[in-house]
Image (cartoon, grey):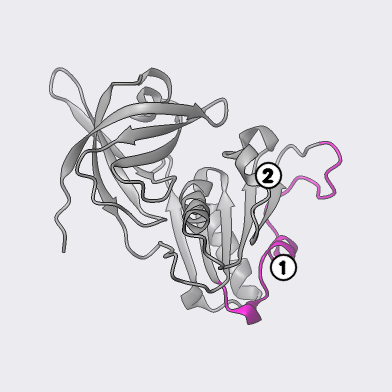
Amino acid sequence: MRRLVWRAAELVGSTPETATARTLRLRVPGWPGHLAGQHVDVRLTAEDGYSTQRSYSLAGPADGEYVELTVEDVPDGEVSPYLTEIMEAGDQVEIRGPVGGWFVWRAENERPVLLVAGGSGIVPLMAMIRTRRQAGSRAPFRLVYSLRGPDGAYYADELRRPDPGLDVSFLYTRTVPEGASRPAGRIMLADLAEGGWPAGHAPDCFVCGPTGFVEAAADLLLVLGHAPERIRTERFGPTGG
C-alpha cells in the first residue's frame, strides 16, 4: 500500500461557484495522480504551531501536478473560511492524498452510471463527469442534482452546456426557478425514476451529500430495484469531510 505523505500545495487560481463556495486550483509537486471520486486531507498550520485539517473531495480528473477542490464556506469553520475568503494566489497549504478507493469511477468502465448529488455532494460526482469527458468515454451518464435553489448550483454553466451522453436533472428543495414544472421539495421516487436509469440497465449508482439525503436517495434506489452492491454512497459531515 502506498504511504500517504503531506505535500506543499500552492494556489495558482480560483473560481467562485456560488456566493459561499470557491474552486481552488492548486499545484502540488510530486502529486501521484488520483481517481475520480477520491478526496484529500488539507492541513493549515498557524504561526504558533497549531494545526488543523479537513477532508475535501477532488473536483476534477487527474491533471499532472495540479488538483482542484471546491470548498463551501462553513460558518465557524477552522479551514473553509481561509480557503474561500483569505487564501490568495501564491499562498500554500499542505495536502495529503489521494484517499479512498471504493467511491471511485474508472474511465475504462462502460456501464451506465447514475449520479445523485445533494448540495455540495456534487463535487466528487463532477470529477467523474469531467473524467468521462477527458477520456472520451462512451459510458452513458445521468445526473440528478438536488439543491436548495438555483443560486446554490455548483458548476452551473458547465452542467448546462451540451455534453453528449450526459443527461442532467435539477431538483430544488426550497426555491424553484420561474417556469419550473416540479414544485420545491425533497427528492422523491419519481425524480429518480424519471431522471435516472431503470434498474434493468444495471447502472453503477453513486450518491453523495448530507447523511439524511444520502440515506433517503439510497433507499429510493432500492425501492426502484437497483442492486445494493451497485449503490455506492458517500456522506458529507458539517465540515465537508
- What kind of element bears circle 2? helix
- What kind of element bears circle 1? helix
Q: Is residue 239 in view? A: no
Front: mark 1 or 2: 2
**Total numbered labels placed on residues in the image:** 2
| Residue 68 point in image, percent of width and height | 39, 39
Cα distance between the residues tagged 1 and 2: 21 Å
Q: Which residue is mark 1?
A: 193
What is the magenta range? 178-203
Where residue 223 sits, quadrant-wise, is: bottom right
The answer to if 168 sits in the magenta stretch is no
Task: Please name the residue shown 58% across and 64% down the image.
Answer: 114
Mark 1 Cα shell of 10 Å, populated few (<14), some (14-19), many (≥20) = some
Nearer the observer, 108 or 143: 108
| Residue 14 point in image, percent of width and height | 44, 27
Task: Please name the residue shown 64% across and 49% down the image.
Answer: 146
